[in-house]
Protein backbone atom coordinates (compact mmCIF):
# COMPACT_ATOMS: atom_id res chain seq x y z
CA UNK A 1 0.00 0.00 0.00
CA UNK A 2 2.82 2.38 0.89
CA UNK A 3 4.54 1.71 -2.43
CA UNK A 4 1.39 2.61 -4.33
CA UNK A 5 1.09 5.94 -2.50
CA UNK A 6 4.77 6.69 -3.04
CA UNK A 7 4.44 5.73 -6.72
CA UNK A 8 1.42 8.01 -7.18
CA UNK A 9 3.24 10.90 -5.49
CA UNK A 10 6.28 10.37 -7.72
CA UNK A 11 4.11 10.29 -10.86
CA UNK A 12 2.28 13.47 -9.82
CA UNK A 13 5.57 15.25 -9.09
CA UNK A 14 7.05 14.15 -12.41
CA UNK A 15 3.95 15.37 -14.24
CA UNK A 16 4.13 18.73 -12.46
CA UNK A 17 7.82 19.07 -13.36
CA UNK A 18 7.12 18.13 -16.98
CA UNK A 19 4.35 20.72 -17.25
CA UNK A 20 6.55 23.42 -15.72
CA UNK A 21 9.49 22.61 -17.99
CA UNK A 22 7.25 22.87 -21.05
CA UNK A 23 5.96 26.21 -19.79
CA UNK A 24 9.50 27.47 -19.35
CA UNK A 25 10.43 26.28 -22.86
CA UNK A 26 7.48 28.20 -24.29
CA UNK A 27 8.47 31.33 -22.35
CA UNK A 28 12.05 31.04 -23.59
CA UNK A 29 10.85 30.61 -27.17
CA UNK A 30 8.67 33.72 -26.87
CA UNK A 31 11.50 35.72 -25.33
CA UNK A 32 13.87 34.63 -28.11
CA UNK A 33 11.38 35.68 -30.76
CA UNK A 34 10.86 39.08 -29.13
CA UNK A 35 14.61 39.54 -28.73
CA UNK A 36 15.23 38.65 -32.38
CA UNK A 37 12.49 41.05 -33.47
CA UNK A 38 13.99 43.82 -31.34
CA UNK A 39 17.42 43.14 -32.82
CA UNK A 40 15.94 43.08 -36.32
CA UNK A 41 14.16 46.33 -35.62
CA UNK A 42 17.36 47.98 -34.45
CA UNK A 43 19.39 46.63 -37.34
CA UNK A 44 16.52 47.21 -39.77
CA UNK A 45 16.75 50.95 -39.32
CA UNK A 46 20.31 50.88 -40.66
CA UNK A 47 19.40 48.48 -43.48
CA UNK A 48 16.45 50.64 -44.46
CA UNK A 49 18.79 53.37 -45.59
CA UNK A 50 20.70 50.99 -47.82
CA UNK A 51 18.12 48.80 -49.54
CA UNK A 52 14.60 49.18 -48.08
CA UNK A 53 14.74 45.85 -46.27
CA UNK A 54 12.64 47.34 -43.49
CA UNK A 55 9.74 47.80 -45.93
CA UNK A 56 9.97 44.18 -47.01
CA UNK A 57 9.91 43.06 -43.37
CA UNK A 58 6.87 45.12 -42.58
CA UNK A 59 4.98 43.89 -45.63
CA UNK A 60 5.47 40.17 -44.99
CA UNK A 61 5.86 40.07 -41.22
CA UNK A 62 2.09 39.92 -40.77
CA UNK A 63 1.89 36.69 -42.79
CA UNK A 64 3.76 34.43 -40.39
CA UNK A 65 3.09 33.34 -36.84
CA UNK A 66 5.60 33.48 -34.02
CA UNK A 67 6.19 29.72 -34.25
CA UNK A 68 6.98 29.92 -37.95
CA UNK A 69 9.18 32.97 -37.41
CA UNK A 70 11.06 31.06 -34.73
CA UNK A 71 11.37 28.02 -37.02
CA UNK A 72 12.76 30.14 -39.85
CA UNK A 73 15.25 31.82 -37.53
CA UNK A 74 16.37 28.43 -36.23
CA UNK A 75 17.00 27.30 -39.82
CA UNK A 76 19.12 30.42 -40.34
CA UNK A 77 21.05 29.87 -37.12
CA UNK A 78 21.86 26.34 -38.28
CA UNK A 79 23.09 27.59 -41.65
CA UNK A 80 20.05 26.42 -43.64
CA UNK A 81 19.30 29.63 -45.51
CA UNK A 82 17.87 27.88 -48.57
CA UNK A 83 15.55 25.79 -46.38
CA UNK A 84 14.45 28.97 -44.60
CA UNK A 85 13.60 30.61 -47.93
CA UNK A 86 11.68 27.52 -49.07
CA UNK A 87 9.78 27.33 -45.79
CA UNK A 88 8.88 31.03 -45.93
CA UNK A 89 7.69 30.71 -49.54
CA UNK A 90 5.54 27.69 -48.66
CA UNK A 91 3.89 29.44 -45.73
CA UNK A 92 3.35 32.88 -47.23
CA UNK A 93 2.87 31.90 -50.87
CA UNK A 94 5.32 34.61 -51.97
CA UNK A 95 7.75 34.69 -54.84
CA UNK A 96 11.42 33.81 -54.62
CA UNK A 97 12.67 37.41 -54.58
CA UNK A 98 10.28 38.49 -51.83
CA UNK A 99 11.12 35.43 -49.73
CA UNK A 100 14.86 35.91 -50.26
CA UNK A 101 14.63 39.60 -49.34
CA UNK A 102 12.75 38.74 -46.17
CA UNK A 103 15.18 35.96 -45.18
CA UNK A 104 18.16 38.22 -45.96
CA UNK A 105 16.71 40.83 -43.64
CA UNK A 106 16.55 38.21 -40.86
CA UNK A 107 19.97 36.75 -41.57
CA UNK A 108 21.64 38.48 -38.66
CA UNK A 109 24.20 35.69 -38.28
CA UNK A 110 25.67 36.11 -41.75
CA UNK A 111 24.87 32.58 -42.97
Image (cartoon, helix red, strand yellow):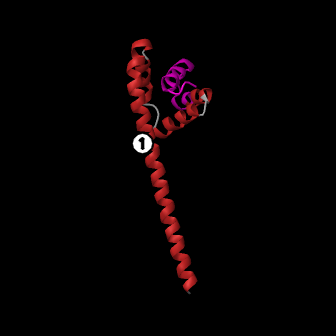
Q: Which residue is mark 1?
A: 31
Assign the magenta stretch its main secondary structure: helix
- Residue at 42% from the left image edge and 18% from the top image edge: 47
* Residue 111 vs residue 68, the one in the foreground: 111
Percent position of residue 102, x then y: 49, 23
Specify whether 106 is left or right of 46. right
Asked whether 43 falls inside the magenta stretch, the response is no
- List the single residue furthest toward the bottom: 1
Q: Position of residue 28 (x, y in %)?
A: 45, 46
Viewed as shown, does residue 36 lie left or right of 71? left
Question: Outermost residue toward the front?
Answer: 109
Q: Is 84 placed above or below 17 here?
A: above
Residue at the location (41% across, 20% down)?
54
Does the magenta portion include 96?
yes
Crowd band around label 1 with a 10 angstrom C-alpha radius: few (<14), some (14–19), many (20+): few
Residue 42 x %, y %: 38, 26
Q: State the residue at coordinates (48%, 50%).
A: 25
* SS for callout 1: helix
Which residues fall within the magenta stretch? Answer: 88-111
Look at 60% across and 34% down and name the residue there: 78
Quadrant in which the C terminus appears: top right
Figure quadrant of residue 45: top left
Amino acid sequence: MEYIIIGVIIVVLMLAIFIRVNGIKTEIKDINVRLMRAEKSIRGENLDLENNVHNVNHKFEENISMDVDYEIRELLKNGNKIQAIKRYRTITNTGLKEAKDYIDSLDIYGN
